[in-house]
Image (cartoon, rainbow, N blue to C red):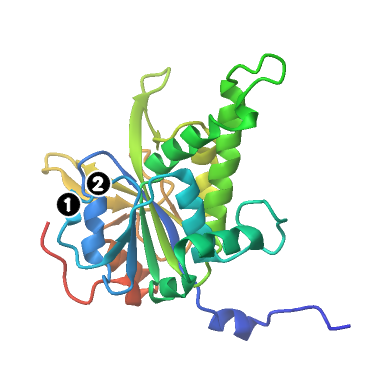
Amino acid sequence: MSGLPIITANQRLAESRGVKGVLVGRWGLGKTYQLWTLDPSSTLFIDIEAGDLAVMEWPGDSLRPRTWEECRDIAVLVGGPNPALRDGQSFSQWHFNEARQRFGDPEKLTKYRTLFIDSITVAGRLCLQWCKGQPQAFSDRTNKPDTRGAYGLMGQEMVAWLTHIQHSRGKHVWFVGILDERSDDFNRKVYELQIDGSKTGLELPGIVDEVITLAEITTGDAPPYRAFVCHTANPWGFPAKDRSGRLDMVEPPDLGQLMRKLGAAEAAAPTDPTAY
């Protein structure tokens, strides 16, 4: 009988670990354009939104999943199988083997150190559409559509998908999302991730290391400027979180530069990106 598989501090420090984050912002602020700040030779653009007009000339590789099943297949090929899951379950060894038969050897994905997934908002729509066709989305008594069942299944599916990708320890992963602004009962501005259902938006900050809002900030009489908001306690109420402790509350809107500050300089573009 072998001993407990204890990982020493030296072993843990020597492990290759990736930054996992979510980048949110309103339409038109340049979230997808952040690809230009990342190294194209080691970055894979997972274009779920089909919104690559701003990066048409970006020289890196991309994937364009069109269904929820394809999104799950990409996740299991990137993250590998979860040995705790049974045959027939998503992200199990069975699922990994099935996805490998459909898409080929996942070894081709090892060259990519960074995954830029745009967007989690559209991934949620694909997931909900798939969920509406599953048995859980229909009433056992009447066999009529059950909206609560569909949204409940969607929450489970999205969290499982995000968590599996997050467990890709050696890769940097950035999920891109659209930020909604609304007013609460006291007419205060409230910001939240635009995604169907509530479970994903509530649990996402606990899954990733970094939550960054790309925002247009106005200070006094100065003209507005774009910036990354990185701290939970910020005066604008934007969703943000920095688990690393290395980021200032406001950082320049350059994801490559942010990765350097997080200790992942290899993820950044080797030269300065085109000026904004």
Height in image: 266 above or below 176? below
Height in image: 154 above or below 57? above
Q: Which type of secondary structure does the marked residue at label 1 adopt? A: helix
Residue 210: x and y in percent read 44, 56
Residue at the disc numbered 2: 51
Residue 95: x and y in percent read 60, 57
Residue at the disc numbered 1: 54
* Quadrant housing the N terminus: bottom right
The residue positioned 38% from the left and 38% from the top of the image is 237
| Residue 253 visible (yes or no) | no
Quadrant housing residue 67: top left
Quadrant housing residue 76: bottom right
- In this view, the residue farthest toward the top is 142
Residue 242: x and y in percent read 44, 57
Mark 2 closeness class: few <14, some 14–19, many ≥20 residues within 10 Å:
few
Q: Amino acid at mark 1?
A: Ala
Quadrant housing residue 172: bottom left
- In this view, the residue farthest toward the front is 101
Q: Amino acid at mark 2?
A: Gly
Contact? badges 1 and 2 (CB < 8 Å): yes
Q: Which type of secondary structure does the marked residue at label 2 adopt? A: loop
Residue 135: x and y in percent read 64, 30
